[in-house]
Image (spheres, helix red, strand yellow):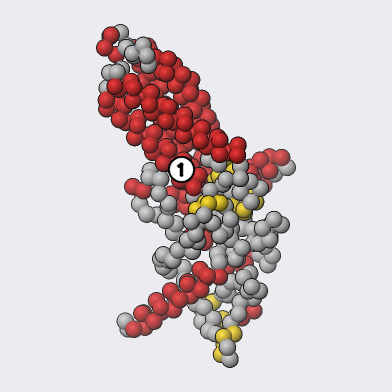
Amino acid sequence: MANNSSCFGTCCGNQIDKSEYLEYNYEKGDKTQAPPRIRANGEKYIDTFNEQPWALSFGTGEEKGIWMNSGDQAGSIMASLVWLLMTYSAVTVTLLTITEGIPPILGMIYTVLCCMALASHAKTSLTDPGSVPRSAVPQEEQRRESPSHSMCGQCQTFKPPMSHHCRICNRCVSRMDHHCPWMNNCVGAANLKHFILFLMYTWTCAAYSLVIFGWNYFFCADDNCTFHVLVIHLVRAMTFLCIGAFLFTSSMLMNVTYGLMTGIGTIDRLKKKATNTMSQSDEEPIALKDVFGIAGYHTWLLPIDPVFEDYDRVMGFSTPQRLVREQQFMEQAAENGQGGR
Protein backbone atom coordinates (compact mmCIF):
# COMPACT_ATOMS: atom_id res chain seq x y z
CA MET A 1 0.00 0.00 0.00
CA ALA A 2 2.05 2.89 -1.31
CA ASN A 3 -0.27 5.59 -0.05
CA ASN A 4 -0.41 4.53 3.62
CA SER A 5 1.94 7.37 4.53
CA SER A 6 -0.32 10.00 3.04
CA CYS A 7 -2.57 12.58 4.62
CA PHE A 8 -4.71 15.45 3.47
CA GLY A 9 -3.37 18.74 2.34
CA THR A 10 -4.10 22.24 3.55
CA CYS A 11 -6.85 24.60 2.52
CA CYS A 12 -6.12 28.26 3.10
CA GLY A 13 -9.38 30.11 2.67
CA ASN A 14 -10.53 29.36 -0.87
CA GLN A 15 -6.99 29.17 -2.23
CA ILE A 16 -5.70 25.62 -2.39
CA ASP A 17 -1.98 25.11 -2.79
CA LYS A 18 -1.50 21.63 -4.18
CA SER A 19 2.20 21.73 -3.38
CA GLU A 20 1.18 21.55 0.27
CA TYR A 21 -0.26 18.07 -0.13
CA LEU A 22 1.54 14.92 0.84
CA GLU A 23 1.46 11.90 -1.45
CA TYR A 24 -2.28 11.41 -1.48
CA ASN A 25 -3.96 9.91 -4.50
CA TYR A 26 -6.30 12.59 -5.75
CA GLU A 27 -6.78 10.82 -9.08
CA LYS A 28 -9.98 8.79 -9.17
CA GLY A 29 -10.25 6.99 -12.45
CA ASP A 30 -10.19 9.50 -15.30
CA LYS A 31 -11.45 12.26 -13.02
CA THR A 32 -9.54 14.39 -10.57
CA GLN A 33 -10.86 13.96 -7.06
CA ALA A 34 -11.77 17.21 -5.34
CA PRO A 35 -9.31 18.11 -2.57
CA PRO A 36 -10.69 17.67 0.96
CA ARG A 37 -12.06 20.54 2.94
CA ILE A 38 -10.07 21.08 6.13
CA ARG A 39 -11.92 21.80 9.34
CA ALA A 40 -12.03 25.42 10.41
CA ASN A 41 -11.01 26.44 13.91
CA GLY A 42 -13.68 25.40 16.38
CA GLU A 43 -15.44 23.15 13.87
CA LYS A 44 -16.08 19.69 15.30
CA TYR A 45 -17.70 16.42 14.42
CA ILE A 46 -18.26 13.09 16.20
CA ASP A 47 -16.66 9.98 14.74
CA THR A 48 -18.30 6.86 16.19
CA PHE A 49 -16.76 4.41 13.73
CA ASN A 50 -15.11 1.42 15.43
CA GLU A 51 -11.72 0.71 13.87
CA GLN A 52 -10.78 -1.99 16.35
CA PRO A 53 -10.55 -5.61 15.14
CA TRP A 54 -13.43 -7.88 16.03
CA ALA A 55 -11.33 -11.03 16.40
CA LEU A 56 -11.76 -12.92 19.69
CA SER A 57 -8.01 -13.15 20.29
CA PHE A 58 -5.65 -11.89 22.96
CA GLY A 59 -2.36 -10.09 22.40
CA THR A 60 -0.75 -6.76 21.58
CA GLY A 61 -0.65 -7.20 17.81
CA GLU A 62 -2.60 -4.89 15.58
CA GLU A 63 -4.87 -7.76 14.48
CA LYS A 64 -5.74 -8.86 18.02
CA GLY A 65 -9.24 -8.10 19.23
CA ILE A 66 -8.48 -7.93 22.98
CA TRP A 67 -5.39 -6.13 24.21
CA MET A 68 -3.45 -8.33 26.63
CA ASN A 69 0.28 -8.61 27.17
CA SER A 70 0.83 -12.35 27.61
CA GLY A 71 4.49 -12.49 26.66
CA ASP A 72 5.87 -11.16 29.94
CA GLN A 73 5.57 -13.86 32.58
CA ALA A 74 6.98 -11.66 35.35
CA GLY A 75 4.44 -8.95 34.54
CA SER A 76 1.60 -11.47 34.55
CA ILE A 77 2.66 -12.69 38.00
CA MET A 78 2.96 -9.15 39.39
CA ALA A 79 -0.42 -8.13 37.97
CA SER A 80 -2.03 -11.23 39.49
CA LEU A 81 -0.34 -10.43 42.79
CA VAL A 82 -2.12 -7.07 42.85
CA TRP A 83 -5.48 -8.84 42.66
CA LEU A 84 -4.44 -11.34 45.29
CA LEU A 85 -3.37 -8.67 47.78
CA MET A 86 -6.40 -6.48 47.16
CA THR A 87 -8.69 -9.49 47.61
CA TYR A 88 -6.85 -10.37 50.84
CA SER A 89 -7.42 -6.87 52.20
CA ALA A 90 -11.11 -6.93 51.24
CA VAL A 91 -11.59 -10.31 52.95
CA THR A 92 -9.81 -9.08 56.09
CA VAL A 93 -12.03 -5.99 56.33
CA THR A 94 -15.10 -8.14 55.67
CA LEU A 95 -14.11 -10.45 58.53
CA LEU A 96 -13.66 -7.42 60.76
CA THR A 97 -17.19 -6.40 59.90
CA ILE A 98 -18.60 -9.89 60.52
CA THR A 99 -16.86 -10.15 63.90
CA GLU A 100 -18.15 -6.65 64.77
CA GLY A 101 -14.65 -5.21 64.95
CA ILE A 102 -15.73 -2.24 62.84
CA PRO A 103 -19.16 -0.87 61.89
CA PRO A 104 -20.68 -2.41 58.73
CA ILE A 105 -20.76 0.96 56.94
CA LEU A 106 -16.97 1.23 57.19
CA GLY A 107 -16.56 -2.24 55.73
CA MET A 108 -18.93 -1.42 52.87
CA ILE A 109 -17.02 1.75 52.03
CA TYR A 110 -13.71 -0.11 51.91
CA THR A 111 -15.17 -2.87 49.72
CA VAL A 112 -16.46 -0.30 47.22
CA LEU A 113 -13.06 1.43 47.11
CA CYS A 114 -11.35 -1.91 46.65
CA CYS A 115 -13.69 -2.86 43.79
CA MET A 116 -13.05 0.48 42.07
CA ALA A 117 -9.29 -0.04 42.41
CA LEU A 118 -9.51 -3.52 40.88
CA ALA A 119 -11.77 -2.29 38.07
CA SER A 120 -9.27 0.49 37.30
CA HIS A 121 -6.45 -2.06 37.33
CA ALA A 122 -8.33 -4.29 34.89
CA LYS A 123 -9.01 -1.35 32.58
CA THR A 124 -5.36 -0.29 32.68
CA SER A 125 -4.16 -3.81 31.92
CA LEU A 126 -6.68 -4.63 29.17
CA THR A 127 -6.85 -1.25 27.43
CA ASP A 128 -4.73 -0.44 24.40
CA PRO A 129 -2.41 2.25 25.83
CA GLY A 130 -2.28 4.10 22.51
CA SER A 131 -0.42 1.78 20.16
CA VAL A 132 0.56 3.32 16.84
CA PRO A 133 -0.87 1.38 13.86
CA ARG A 134 1.12 0.68 10.70
CA SER A 135 -1.14 3.06 8.78
CA ALA A 136 -0.39 6.01 11.09
CA VAL A 137 0.41 9.31 9.38
CA PRO A 138 1.40 12.72 10.78
CA GLN A 139 -1.27 15.27 11.52
CA GLU A 140 -1.52 18.23 9.20
CA GLU A 141 -0.12 20.59 11.83
CA GLN A 142 2.85 18.30 12.39
CA ARG A 143 3.51 18.13 8.68
CA ARG A 144 3.42 21.91 8.35
CA GLU A 145 5.77 22.45 11.30
CA SER A 146 8.39 19.94 10.16
CA PRO A 147 9.24 18.58 6.71
CA SER A 148 10.58 15.33 8.19
CA HIS A 149 9.22 12.98 10.84
CA SER A 150 10.60 10.26 13.06
CA MET A 151 10.18 6.63 12.08
CA CYS A 152 10.35 3.64 14.40
CA GLY A 153 13.11 1.27 13.41
CA GLN A 154 11.24 -1.67 14.97
CA CYS A 155 7.69 -1.01 13.75
CA GLN A 156 8.78 0.61 10.49
CA THR A 157 6.05 3.22 10.83
CA PHE A 158 5.54 6.85 11.76
CA LYS A 159 6.62 7.60 15.33
CA PRO A 160 4.52 10.41 16.92
CA PRO A 161 6.15 12.94 19.26
CA MET A 162 6.61 11.70 22.86
CA SER A 163 5.96 8.12 21.77
CA HIS A 164 8.33 5.25 22.48
CA HIS A 165 8.74 1.68 21.35
CA CYS A 166 8.11 -0.84 24.12
CA ARG A 167 10.17 -3.97 23.68
CA ILE A 168 7.82 -5.91 25.99
CA CYS A 169 4.57 -5.00 24.20
CA ASN A 170 6.49 -4.83 20.89
CA ARG A 171 4.53 -1.74 19.85
CA CYS A 172 5.08 1.98 19.68
CA VAL A 173 2.88 3.71 22.26
CA SER A 174 1.68 7.30 21.99
CA ARG A 175 2.73 9.58 24.86
CA MET A 176 4.20 6.57 26.62
CA ASP A 177 5.05 7.25 30.24
CA HIS A 178 6.51 3.86 31.18
CA HIS A 179 5.85 0.14 31.10
CA CYS A 180 4.39 -0.86 34.44
CA PRO A 181 4.95 -4.51 35.48
CA TRP A 182 2.22 -4.20 38.13
CA MET A 183 -0.24 -3.43 35.31
CA ASN A 184 1.47 -5.82 32.87
CA ASN A 185 1.00 -3.07 30.31
CA CYS A 186 2.36 0.22 29.11
CA VAL A 187 0.94 3.45 30.47
CA GLY A 188 0.20 5.75 27.56
CA ALA A 189 -2.22 8.34 26.26
CA ALA A 190 -5.21 5.98 26.07
CA ASN A 191 -5.03 4.36 29.52
CA LEU A 192 -3.39 7.05 31.65
CA LYS A 193 -6.79 7.87 33.18
CA HIS A 194 -7.29 4.29 34.37
CA PHE A 195 -3.76 4.18 35.79
CA ILE A 196 -4.31 7.39 37.74
CA LEU A 197 -7.62 6.09 39.07
CA PHE A 198 -5.95 2.87 40.20
CA LEU A 199 -3.31 4.85 42.09
CA MET A 200 -5.95 7.11 43.66
CA TYR A 201 -8.25 4.29 44.78
CA THR A 202 -5.35 2.16 46.06
CA TRP A 203 -3.93 5.14 47.95
CA THR A 204 -7.37 5.81 49.45
CA CYS A 205 -7.79 2.14 50.46
CA ALA A 206 -4.40 2.13 52.18
CA ALA A 207 -4.97 5.44 53.99
CA TYR A 208 -8.52 4.42 54.95
CA SER A 209 -7.33 1.12 56.45
CA LEU A 210 -4.46 2.74 58.35
CA VAL A 211 -6.85 5.29 59.87
CA ILE A 212 -9.22 2.51 61.01
CA PHE A 213 -6.42 0.38 62.42
CA GLY A 214 -4.71 3.37 64.03
CA TRP A 215 -7.93 4.49 65.68
CA ASN A 216 -8.49 1.01 67.06
CA TYR A 217 -4.92 0.69 68.33
CA PHE A 218 -4.38 4.14 69.85
CA PHE A 219 -7.83 5.41 70.80
CA CYS A 220 -9.97 2.34 71.43
CA ALA A 221 -10.49 1.77 75.16
CA ASP A 222 -13.75 -0.13 74.88
CA ASP A 223 -14.03 -3.89 74.62
CA ASN A 224 -16.68 -3.46 71.94
CA CYS A 225 -14.16 -2.18 69.42
CA THR A 226 -11.45 -4.76 70.08
CA PHE A 227 -10.62 -6.95 67.10
CA HIS A 228 -11.38 -10.66 67.30
CA VAL A 229 -8.40 -12.85 68.21
CA LEU A 230 -8.72 -14.83 64.97
CA VAL A 231 -8.60 -11.69 62.84
CA ILE A 232 -5.88 -9.78 64.66
CA HIS A 233 -3.08 -11.60 62.80
CA LEU A 234 -4.67 -10.81 59.44
CA VAL A 235 -4.91 -7.16 60.49
CA ARG A 236 -1.24 -7.03 61.45
CA ALA A 237 -0.16 -8.41 58.08
CA MET A 238 -2.54 -6.05 56.31
CA THR A 239 -1.08 -3.09 58.23
CA PHE A 240 2.38 -3.70 56.74
CA LEU A 241 0.77 -4.20 53.33
CA CYS A 242 -1.10 -0.88 53.60
CA ILE A 243 2.02 1.02 54.69
CA GLY A 244 3.92 -0.26 51.65
CA ALA A 245 1.01 0.46 49.31
CA PHE A 246 0.56 3.95 50.76
CA LEU A 247 4.21 4.88 50.27
CA PHE A 248 4.43 3.38 46.78
CA THR A 249 1.23 4.94 45.44
CA SER A 250 2.14 8.30 47.01
CA SER A 251 5.41 8.24 45.10
CA MET A 252 3.70 7.24 41.85
CA LEU A 253 0.99 9.89 42.22
CA MET A 254 3.65 12.56 42.66
CA ASN A 255 5.46 11.21 39.61
CA VAL A 256 2.30 11.28 37.48
CA THR A 257 1.36 14.76 38.73
CA TYR A 258 4.80 16.04 37.81
CA GLY A 259 4.41 14.54 34.35
CA LEU A 260 1.03 16.23 33.83
CA MET A 261 2.33 19.61 35.03
CA THR A 262 5.48 19.53 32.89
CA GLY A 263 4.28 17.48 29.94
CA ILE A 264 7.35 15.24 30.29
CA GLY A 265 6.79 11.53 30.80
CA THR A 266 8.92 9.26 32.94
CA ILE A 267 11.03 7.90 30.07
CA ASP A 268 11.63 11.34 28.57
CA ARG A 269 12.47 12.76 31.99
CA LEU A 270 15.07 10.05 32.63
CA LYS A 271 16.60 10.67 29.20
CA LYS A 272 16.76 14.41 29.76
CA LYS A 273 18.32 13.96 33.19
CA ALA A 274 20.92 11.58 31.73
CA THR A 275 21.89 14.15 29.11
CA ASN A 276 21.45 17.12 31.47
CA THR A 277 18.90 18.79 29.16
CA MET A 278 15.98 19.23 31.54
CA SER A 279 16.42 23.02 31.46
CA GLN A 280 15.97 22.99 27.67
CA SER A 281 12.55 21.33 27.81
CA ASP A 282 9.79 23.15 25.94
CA GLU A 283 6.92 20.68 26.46
CA GLU A 284 3.49 22.03 27.38
CA PRO A 285 1.51 20.78 30.41
CA ILE A 286 -1.00 18.06 29.63
CA ALA A 287 -4.57 19.30 29.94
CA LEU A 288 -6.84 17.23 32.16
CA LYS A 289 -9.34 16.92 29.32
CA ASP A 290 -6.63 15.08 27.36
CA VAL A 291 -6.49 12.51 30.16
CA PHE A 292 -10.02 12.25 31.58
CA GLY A 293 -11.95 13.32 28.46
CA ILE A 294 -14.84 15.71 27.93
CA ALA A 295 -17.79 13.41 28.69
CA GLY A 296 -18.41 15.17 32.00
CA TYR A 297 -16.87 15.46 35.43
CA HIS A 298 -19.04 12.61 36.70
CA THR A 299 -17.07 10.22 34.44
CA TRP A 300 -13.66 11.25 35.76
CA LEU A 301 -13.83 8.93 38.78
CA LEU A 302 -15.24 5.98 36.81
CA PRO A 303 -12.95 3.45 35.07
CA ILE A 304 -14.53 3.96 31.67
CA ASP A 305 -12.77 5.01 28.48
CA PRO A 306 -12.49 8.78 28.10
CA VAL A 307 -14.02 10.66 25.17
CA PHE A 308 -11.37 12.99 23.80
CA GLU A 309 -12.12 16.34 22.24
CA ASP A 310 -9.62 15.66 19.44
CA TYR A 311 -8.51 12.04 19.36
CA ASP A 312 -5.83 12.57 16.71
CA ARG A 313 -4.27 15.46 18.63
CA VAL A 314 -4.15 13.47 21.87
CA MET A 315 -2.65 10.42 20.16
CA GLY A 316 -0.28 12.45 18.02
CA PHE A 317 -1.18 10.78 14.74
CA SER A 318 -4.01 10.14 12.32
CA THR A 319 -4.81 7.45 9.77
CA PRO A 320 -5.94 7.69 6.15
CA GLN A 321 -9.18 5.95 7.09
CA ARG A 322 -10.03 8.58 9.71
CA LEU A 323 -9.09 11.37 7.32
CA VAL A 324 -11.40 9.95 4.68
CA ARG A 325 -14.25 9.85 7.20
CA GLU A 326 -13.45 13.41 8.22
CA GLN A 327 -13.69 14.50 4.60
CA GLN A 328 -17.08 12.80 4.28
CA PHE A 329 -18.32 14.47 7.47
CA MET A 330 -17.16 17.85 6.27
CA GLU A 331 -18.73 17.42 2.83
CA GLN A 332 -22.00 16.31 4.41
CA ALA A 333 -21.93 19.30 6.78
CA ALA A 334 -21.31 21.62 3.84
CA GLU A 335 -24.23 20.12 1.90
CA ASN A 336 -26.54 20.42 4.91
CA GLY A 337 -25.45 24.02 5.38
CA GLN A 338 -26.19 24.89 1.77
CA GLY A 339 -29.49 23.07 1.90
CA GLY A 340 -30.61 25.09 4.92
CA ARG A 341 -29.99 28.43 3.25
Q: Which residue is drawn at 47% across and 36% down?
A: 199
Q: Which of 213 and 16 is in front in this view?
A: 213
Q: Which residue is drawn at 38% across and 36% down?
A: 115
Which quarter of the rendering shows the N terminus? bottom right
Secondary structure beneath disc 1?
helix
- 208 vs 189, left or right, is left
* Number of numbered tags placed on the structure image: 1
Outermost residue toward the front in this view? 56
In the rendered image, the vertical position of residue 47 relative to residue 164, given as above or below: below
Q: Which of 161 and 86 is in front in this view?
A: 86
Quarter holding residue 233: top left
Quarter holding residue 218: top left
Q: Which residue is drawn at 43% across and 74% down?
A: 329
- 145 vs 41, left or right, is right
Q: Position of residue 70 (x, y in %)?
A: 57, 45
In the rendered image, the vertical position of residue 41 relative to residue 246, given as above or below: below
- 91 vs 284, left or right, is left
Q: Is residue 143 visible?
A: yes
Which quarter of the rendering shows the C terminus? bottom left
Residue type pointed to by label 1:
Ala
Q: Where is residue 138 in the image (x, y as percent from the top left)?
A: 60, 65
Residue where numbered disc 1 is placed: 122
Q: Position of residue 132 (x, y in %)?
A: 59, 58
Q: Residue at x 62, y 54 (%)?
A: 172
Q: Nearer the viewer, residue 337 or 322?
A: 322
| Crowd band around label 1 with a 10 angstrom C-alpha radius: few (<14), some (14–19), many (20+) | some
